[in-house]
Image: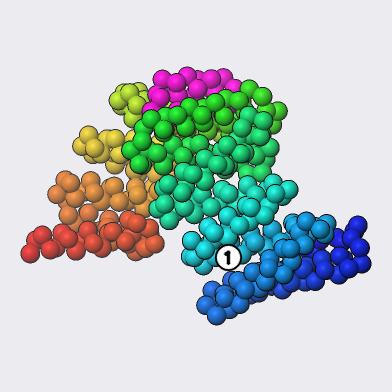
Amino acid sequence: LLIAAAGCSGGDSRLLYRAEEAVFKARKMNDELIVATMNPSFLEKTLEAYRAVVADYGKYADDIEGMRELVVSAQMELAELEFRAGRLMAAREDFAAAYEMASGVPAARANALWSGAVISREAGDAGSAISLFSRFADEYLTPAMASATARMNRRYLLTPLRIAELHLESGNEREAGAWLDRAESLFEGLIESDPDTSLVREAHYNLVTALLQGKRWSKALDQISRMKGIYRNDVDTPSLLFLEARIQIDGFGRTAEGLRLLDRIAADHPRSREAVSALLTAGGIHFLAREFRKAEALYRKILDGYPDAGAALAEARWQIAQIAEEEGRWLDASLGYKSIYTDFPGTIQGMEAPLRIARHFRELG
């Protein structure tokens, strides 16, 4: 969309109009590039079109109203295109440039900094990712800024959790713990002070995530109990029961209590999105305990009751075939595996099934 040139002098208006035309041309090329599936030569021409906007009009950003926003948009779109093309380091550099030039354009500045951190993480550069995410947290997730930042993009609230994950992956448990503490404070602050009820609900769930990530099982159970008193509806109740079941099983080793909660989800909330996950989880527990009849009964509930469950159907069939193989019923197992790669060829199970059959015959000689 063209930026209105109201308030500009005649010369300024003409410059702004030419800049708008140049951005429009670059965007049109970008759209055509998607259709052309990233043709290399056309990709270079499109990147150059964006770079030309920044080079030719960036020098007017402080002097002409609306020019900074236009140039920043071009710089951001340049970096995003490089990212889509798999040029991660170039994209990170151009997001960094966008961050520097986007003073006075807070949404773009935040996006540029966050995107650079995400790219660093994807590229395996943990040090850079931690540095950029930390700068983001210091700039945008202070108590005074957190609510406004969440309204830009709620994913930004997960930044302290991302930093904690990176520190844990690096073996630095002390720093990970400090960032989890910071995450808890962030989410508690939003819960206590923000007037947006949907944001407060999300902060509640993010707080549970932070507690689970830090294996703070008792505090997580307390938080879930607190949420049960607030969110009494058909969406939140099964979700909270599922989280509670995972804590009982993974945190405290109380498998029987966890199974009781999973059974309750499947029985009382069969149309919830957690119902299939509850059946799969409970089936997996019985499978590992070699309680094959109980496990198979749960997997068949998925096949019979949830025909639109997608990948869960492939997983249920896979587990039933595994049970047959464990019990020495190879004919049943092979038929199960064959049906999986026939009906679910694009799933992990569908790709693994023919390999499992081939391995069996290899072992037979």
Point 77% across, 62% down: residue: 60
Q: Which residue is mark 1?
A: 81
Boundaries of the magenta span: 211-233
320, 62: nearer the viewer: 62
Point 30% across, 51% down: residue: 318
Q: Position of residue 247 (x, y in %)?
A: 39, 27
Q: Is residue 309 above or below residue 15?
A: above
Q: Which quadrant is the N terminus positioned in?
A: bottom right
Taking the magenta stretch, the answer to whether it contains residue 352 is no
Q: Is residue 15 above or below residue 186?
A: below
Please state which amino acid type lies under the numbered disc 1.
Leu
Q: Residues within 10 Å of mark 1 (few under 14, many from 20)?
A: many
Taking the magenta stretch, the answer to whether it contains residue 225 is yes
103, 334: nearer the viewer: 103
Q: Main secondary structure of the magenta part?
A: helix
Q: Position of residue 204 (x, y in %)?
A: 56, 28
